[in-house]
Each structure stands twice: as structure tokens, then as C-alpha cells.
Image (tube, rainbow, N blue to C red):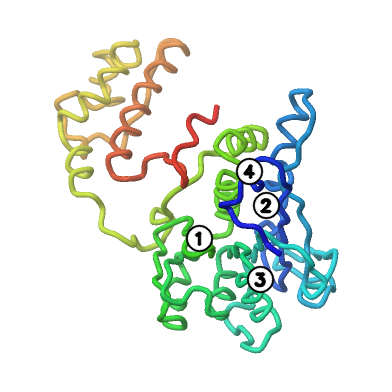
Amino acid sequence: MARTAKSPACRDNDVLDVIVVLLEASYPSTAIGPIEVFHSAGVLWNLLRGESQRPRFRVRTASIDGKTVGSLCSVGLTPECSIRDVKRADIIVLPASGMQAHIIENTPLLQWLRKWHDKGAYIAGVCTGVGFLAAAGLLDGKRATTHWAVADSMRQRFPRVNWQPEQFVTEDGRVLCSGGVYSSIDLSLYLVEKFCGHEIALQCAKSLLLSMPRRRQTGYSVLPLSRPKKFILRDLGSANSLKLVYRPLARNGCANNSSVRCGMLPTPDEPIGTGVGAFRLFATNSAAFDAGLRGFTTKIVELLTMSEIGAKSFNGSYGNVS
């Protein structure tokens, strides 16, 4: 029987069982990424530091019929078993699949997902793999996300789902969804933190050289899913903001009067629209360049943070993964 996140054993003593279902016509990274993240939790960090390893997850792979599946990258993936052979499952992960456009409603996978969810397992879908969760009825009336490019078709096919494609990860009633292909990493880290705590998730991210988990996939869409923040556009175009960006460069020797006169940098009072196209950093030495660039980057990050693109973790805050 599956265990739940409320059980202290999940965090402290037990090794949780993760089943990654291998699907036809998938991106293999959406299966392999989660496998590596879960396998590394409590293992890789300890190995790198010469400490005793303490695996937090036991990861197995399964396909619908137990046979090797093909992928969109011509990479074959061979499972350990078929889904009907699975005896224990605390977390089930569905990778992206090219089959999403023509999900077969009577596939045994849908009933199998419902069975394990009823037993208390957490069911997670990546990218288009979320469609299997929706087809199984596990997302009816719940929040969900998917790849931004297929959000409209998902909304039409599954109107009972509360689609929120701007999100990277959603969780509602032990059903989790993630956005595009590599959001499988964000989803996996989310689950590591959920079940193992902040410190293990941070160690896992550091040892695998993973970036901070992302919150929103809006910026990846071809057409914005939401309008740009007016105050951001206003601030970036104001003379005051340009001065704040320019001053760190000037203080550290990255800009001088001659570079301004030559058009290499706009003047502090020049509207950003007239000079930003030819904005080139100039420095007499690398140390000054680095210091000035840090100041420039800091200011841009501050402005972006105001637009809700700040670096926060899904379950709180991962802190600085450096």
C-alpha cells in the first residue's frame, strides 16, 4: 500500500518507491531526468563528500506492456517490468509522450493510474504526459499545467481541468503536473523537497549542478501568456533607471567620458531607447569590467524580481544554490 507525505517515515526512515513509466514517442530526458534526480537524493552529495550514502528513493521503470519503447530521439528505453508487475509505488511519474494527440481512452494505463492514486500514491505528469492524468479523470476540477504550446488543445480536450499553463509545477490532490520538457527536473526537485526536506533537495541540486527551480514558463512562450508589467517597461525606459545601471559601471572604471562621447555607452541622462541597441561594455581592466558587470546584473535582477520572476522554490525557498 502506498504511503503518504504526512507519514513521518517518508521523511526520516523509509525509502520511497518511485515508478517512472516509459511511454512511446517520448523525449527520453523527461524520464531519465527524474530517474537521476530521485536516484541522487541522499546519494551523490554524500559520495562527493566522502560520507555514507543514504538513498531516499528506490527508482524503477515500467512500460505498459514491459517491452522496450521508442523515443523521439531514436533512443530505445528498456523498462524493468510492465505496469501490471508493479507491487509498490509511492510516486508515479509520466514523461512527455508524442501519443498525447491521440490518447487511447481504453489503454490499461488510465485504470492503472486511478488504482494507484486511490491507494494513496502521488501521480506526476511531465509536459504532454499530463494528458494521461487528465484522460484518467485525475485532474477534473483541479489545477494543472502543461507545455505552454499545447495548453489550448488541452483546454479544449479536457475542459473540466483548471489549466494554469503559466506555472512550471502544480500540485492538487496528490496529482502533480509540470510544464515543458526540462521542467521534469523542476518537478523532481519539488518532490525531493516535499518528501525529504529543504536540505536534501538543496544538496541534490548542488551535486547535480542544477539551477534554482523555476516558477513560471510564461517567458518561454512565443506569444506572451500575460501582458508585460507596465511599471517594468516604464522603469527600464526611464532616465533614473539608466543612471542606476550606469553608475556601477562608471564607479568601477567601465565607462568614462571618452567612451560616452564615442557612443559606446549612453549618457546617464540619455533615454535608454536611443542608445541601448549599441550598448557595449568598456573596461580598461578585467577587474573593473567584472565589478561593473556585477552591478549591472544586480540591477536587472532587481527589476525582474519586481515582475514576479523572482527565484523562489515551489515549497518555500531553496536559498542560494552556489
Question: Dots 3 and 4: beta carbons under 8 Å?
Answer: no
Q: Earlier in the sequence, mark 3 or mark 4?
A: 4
Callout 4 amino acid: Arg
Q: Earlier in the sequence, mark 2 or mark 4?
A: 4
Q: Residues within 10 Å of mark 4 (few under 14, many from 20)?
A: some
Q: Secondary structure at mark 2?
A: helix
- In what element is the residue under mark 1? loop
- Against 73, residue 102 (above or below) is below
Task: Give the quadrant of residue 202.
Answer: top right
Decide if residue 211 is on the left or right side of residue 67: left
Q: Earlier in the sequence, mark 4 or mark 1?
A: 4
Q: Residue 306: give x, y in percent of width and height.
A: 27, 40
Tell me the SS state at disc 4: helix
Q: Are there few (<14), some (14-19), or many (20+) residues within 10 Å of tag 3?
A: some
Residue under pointer 4: 11
In the rendering, which numbered label is found on residue 116? 3
Look at discs 1 and 3 and give the one toward the viewer. 3
Q: Position of residue 108 (x, y in %)?
A: 71, 83
Mark nearer the viewer, 2 or 4: 4
Picture coordinates of residue 124, whole percent (x, y): 59, 63
Figure check: 14 above or below 209: below
Nearer-the-camera pick, 276 or 218: 218
| Label located before the other in sequence (1 or 3) | 3
Q: Which residue is mark 1?
A: 179
Q: Amino acid at mark 1?
A: Gly
Q: Where residue 246 sits in the image (x, y, percent)?
A: 26, 22
Q: Quadrant of the N terminus?
A: bottom right
Quarter of the picture holding the C terminus: top right
309 and 195: which is toward the camera: 195
Horizontal arrangement in the rendering, residue 310 relative to residue 320 (left or right): left
Q: Which residue is mark 2?
A: 33
Horizontally, residue 112 falls left or right of residue 253, namely right
